[in-house]
Image (spheres, rainbow, N blue to C red):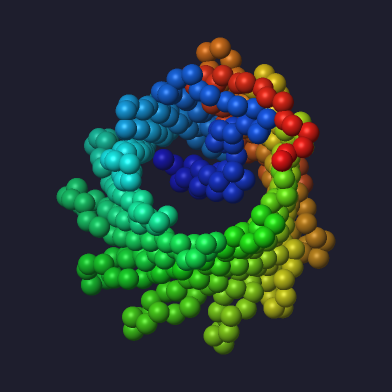
Amino acid sequence: MPTTNSRLARVLLAVGAYLCVGTGVFAQTADSQTTEYANKSWTSTTDLKGDNLNPERIIASHSQTDNRTLDEQSIQILSSDGHFEPYQDFETETLQVDANTVRTTIRTFAQDVNRRKTLVQVTEEEKHTLPGGRSNVIRITSNADVNGKLEPVRREIVETKGIGTDIEETNSTVVLGSINGGLTRAIKTRELRKRAANDTVETEKTTWFQDINRNWQLSEVRHATTKQDGTNRTTEERVSRLDAEGKLNEVSHVMSQESESPSGEKRSVAETYSIDVPGTAPDGRLHLVERKTSTESSSSTGERATERQVEKINPGDPGSGLRVSVLVGGRMVPGPSGEQSTVIIRARDLNDDFPVVSVETTKSDRIATIQVQQTPAEKP
């Protein structure tokens, strides 16, 4: 893949993930509708084009047989002769071993120098559900060496258990490959999740890193509070990290609000405050640096539309406040032979115009049967 294309692809993927847009944005419908897919197996083809982007094509498929589910994704790029050629492939296989065990395997393939499909990475995960609401997950990632032999490079162990009636504790340990060979503990986290009154959930997640002397050092603490009021939800998250003097100070604060109208239209706004402001020297205080706004609507025929925008600080004029930086529009139309969707991303350029950065079109043979249900005026 050309260098320019690689850079732009990474930018677009980051923007897409950041905005939660793309074909995945159409995976859910409003609560006033019940969607059931008539077929458990489907395929889709997505074409990604842009003025300065080498065209890409993503072919995805989903199949389910008894207790086994397989999702495949093939990324192809346009070659110099005008044909799409394989670039990277992913396979996610999920197996329901028994009532309490789920095994997931993710395989990543790339093209070698002879353009042969070669396995380069495998992630194996096994989750066990235990009595009393407890569970544990073991996740191992292995990379292939020059001879194609898989060597473990990361192991993660996650254990969840209940503490009392309304408190859940999750502890995780990440083991990474060391320069001396083998694996060594590198990161550990502890998350407490507490249910409070009035549909409120409070979480606190603490992260430690192991230093060169193999001592655990506090790295970060995240506090989040989520309140649910009918179809409206507010979330407040505060992140604190150690400063140069070893003191724990707040570095970011995110406030988000989500609401849904009686007609099923969804709207969300998230504002981020940070001590790091582009174009200015840090003063130790929190400043508004970003605002994300999105709306989603569905019709009785199953057609869905999304509008997203991101406002950010202009590094060249940080004192002028936020300005719109990215605009995203998405539309999905169901049909008798499947779904068709389009996502268009526009970004502000040096002339303050909003040219199209990329256009993503997807065609899928996935067919949904939509049943419209009347939403009660009042919920018990």
Q: Residue furthest bottom?
A: 245
Percent x, y of residue 119:
26, 42
Residue drawn at point x = 53 percent, y = 24 percent: 36
Percent x, y of residue 339:
56, 21
Residue 47 seen anywhere in this rendered image of the structure: yes
Q: Nearer the viewer, residue 194 or 337?
A: 194
Residue drawn at point x = 80 percent, y = 60 percent: 321
Residue drawn at point x = 44 percent, y = 68 percent: 189
Quarter of the image for the C terminus: give it: top right
Percent x, y of residue 9:
51, 43
Q: Is residue 204 above or below residue 231?
A: below
Taking the image as shown, residue 194 lies to the left or right of residue 130, namely: right
Taking the image as shown, residue 30 lies to the left or right of residue 163, namely: right
Q: Nearer the viewer, residue 264 or 90?
A: 264
Percent x, y of residue 31:
65, 34
Residue drawn at point x = 37 percent, y = 82 percent: 215
Q: Nearer the viewer, residue 170 or 13?
A: 170
Q: Is residue 273 above or below residue 267?
A: below
Q: Nearer the viewer, residue 224 or 82?
A: 224
Q: Is residue 188 above or below residue 150?
A: below
